[in-house]
Amino acid sequence: MKNKLNAVSLVSRGKEEAYFKKVMKHAEAQEAYNEAEAFYNFVEQIKLIMAKRHLTYYSVAKKAGMRHQVLARILNGSKNAELSSLSKVAHGVGARLDLNLVFEKR
């Protein structure tokens, strides 16, 4: 039975990848994906720093000047986080938010 389940998941995975490649040909999809990826990378970096330095949500939020509930929403993937809030979160872990332009080859 396990072999059948694995074969089905592989077929589904192939269809998902083909669909993703097709969707990513559209500029709007690329832009949305890039924004989501940048936000995800930011959150993962903050979580990693917090874990390494043994920082709590409360201590980071206090240093950032925001409520710990707001920090929790941001770190749990809230899509409406403003740039100023992200900058505060970076400050809360002792860093500064640095935005860079990454030019794509065309």
Image (spheres, rainbow, N blue to C red):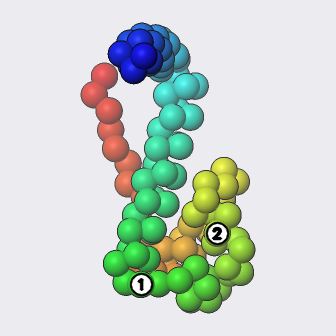
Judge from the rendering whether residue 52 lies leftward or rightward of residue 85; answer left or right.
left
**Label total for image:** 2
- Secondary structure beneath label 1: loop
- The residue under label 2 is 72
Instruction: Tell me what residue is drawn at x 40 percent, y 64 percent.
Output: 45
Q: Position of residue 84 (x, y in %)?
A: 62, 68
- The residue under label 1 is 54
- Seen as rendered, the residue at the extreme front is 1
Q: CA distance from mark 2 to mark 1?
A: 16 Å
- Seen as rendered, the residue at the extreme left is 105
Instruction: Tell me what residue is drawn at x 42 percent, y 16 percent.
Output: 1
Residue 82 visible, this orientation: no
Q: Nearer the viewer, residue 89 or 47?
A: 47
- Secondary structure beneath label 2: helix
Quadrant, the C terminus = top left
Q: Nearer the viewer, residue 17 or 70?
A: 17
Assess disc 2: are there few (<14), some (14-19) or many (≥20) residues with their C-alpha within 10 Å of its C-alpha.
Answer: some
Which image quarter: residue 76? bottom right
4 relative to 103, above or below: above
Q: Amino acid at mark 2?
A: Ala
Q: Earlier in the sequence, mark 2 or mark 1?
A: 1
Assess disc 1: are there few (<14), some (14-19) or many (≥20) residues with their C-alpha within 10 Å of its C-alpha.
Answer: few
Residue 96: give its label: none
Which image quarter: residue 63? bottom right
Q: Position of residue 18 (x, y in %)?
A: 43, 11
Instruction: Tell me what residue is drawn at x 49 percent, y 60 percent.
Output: 43
Q: Amino acid at mark 1?
A: His
Residue 44 visible, this orientation: yes
Instruction: Tell me what residue is drawn at x 56 percent, y 34 percent.
Output: 32
Judge from the rendering whether residue 31 lies leftward or rightward of residue 53; answer left or right.
right
